Amino acid sequence: MNLYEHKSSNIRKSWFLLTIFLVVIIGLGWIFAQAYNSPGILYIAIIVSLVMNIFSYWLSDKIALAASGAKAVTREQEIALYRTVENLSITAGLPMPRLYVIESSQINAFATGRDAEHAAVAVTRGALTKLENEELEGVIAHELSHIGNRDILISSIVVVLAGAIAIMSDIFLRMSRWGLRGSDDNNRGNLIMLIAGIALAILAPIAATIIQLAISRQREYLADTSGALLTRYPDGLANALEKIAQDEMPLKTARNSTAHLFISNPFRGKERSSFLTRLFMTHPPIQDRIAKLRGLK
C-alpha cells in the first residue's frame, strides 16, 4: 500500500468505525425498547449515538490530551521544542500543530486531531530532557508523519469509542441491579439488560483492543519511514527508539484507551511479555522498528 492509498484507507476506516458505532448503539436501543415495550429507549439510543459520534469527530483530540495529562505550551515556554516542530512542519508542508507537554520522565510522544489544520503534538518531559536534538527531531518527524498520513483522525476516534464501550458496560450493569421484579415484561427486560451488561463487561476490553488493532500496526512502520525521510537521518529516530526501549519509567496517566496514540507503548514492560500479549500489542516490537530504520541507510 502506498502513501496515498494509506491516507484514503484511513479516511474510510474512520467513517466505517463511526457508522458501525452508530448502528450498534441504535440496535441495542431497539432491543431494549422492545424488551421494555418503551419507544423512548430507542430515541435515547439514537441521541446518544449521534452525540458520541459528534464528540468522536470534533472533540476526540481534546479528550485524548486531557486523559494524558498534556498541558499546552507556548513558544516562549518551550522555544527549543517549538523551533524543532516549526522547522519540520515547514519541511513537511504541514501547518504548525498545537504543542503540549506531559510532565512525565518517560520518553514518549503522540499526535492527535481530526486533520492537519486542527492537529496537536504532545511530548513528555522525559523526551525533552533525555533525547539529543537529532533524536527528538526523529520523534517529532514520526508524529508529524502521522498527521500527514491522516492517521490521527482514526486514532483519536478510537479513544472515544473505546471509552464509550466501557461506559455502556457500566450503565447496563447498573441498570440490571434494579432487579427482576414487577411484570413479566419488566422481568424479561431486566434479564436481557443483565445478560447484556455481563457480556459487555467481559467483552469491553477485548472490543477496545480489537478496535485499536483495526488501526493497524503498519501505520507505525509507515510513520517511522516517513519520519526518517523527513529528517533524512534514520539513525535519529532509531537511536531515540533504542533509548525508549531501555526506558523503564512509568507514565502515570497511561490509559488503555489512549495507549495506541503514543510512539511507543506507555505501559513499559509489555514488549517482553508472553506471545499472547505480543499478539494483541497495538505497537510493533521496537527492535523490529529499529532494524527497519537501520536498513534505510
Image (tube, grey):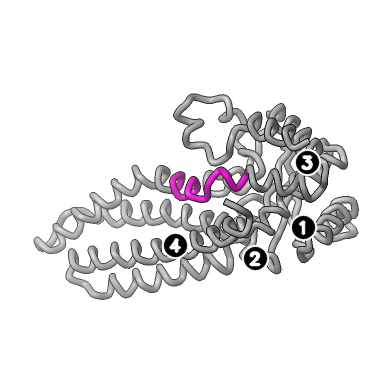
Q: What element carries label 2?
A: loop
Numbered range of the magenta stretch: 208-220
Whether residue 33 can be seen here: yes
**Which element carries disc 4, helix, strand or loop?**
helix
Pick whichever of labels 3 and 4 is earlier in the sequence.
4
Label 4: how many residues lie within 10 Å, few (<14), some (14-19) or many (20+)? few
| Residue linked to disc 3 | 127
Q: Which amino acid does label 1 sit on?
A: Leu
Kindly check if marks 2 and 4 are in contact, taking CB atoms under 8 A apart as contact: no
Is residue 100 positioned above or below 138 on the image? below
Residue corresponding to mark 1: 99
Does residue 257 appear to the left or right of 78 in the view shown? left
Give percent across and percent down for residue 50.
43, 72
- C-alpha span from label 1 to label 2: 15 Å
Instruction: Give percent across and percent down for residue 52.
Output: 46, 66
- Residue contact at pointers 3 and 1, CB within 8 angstroms: no
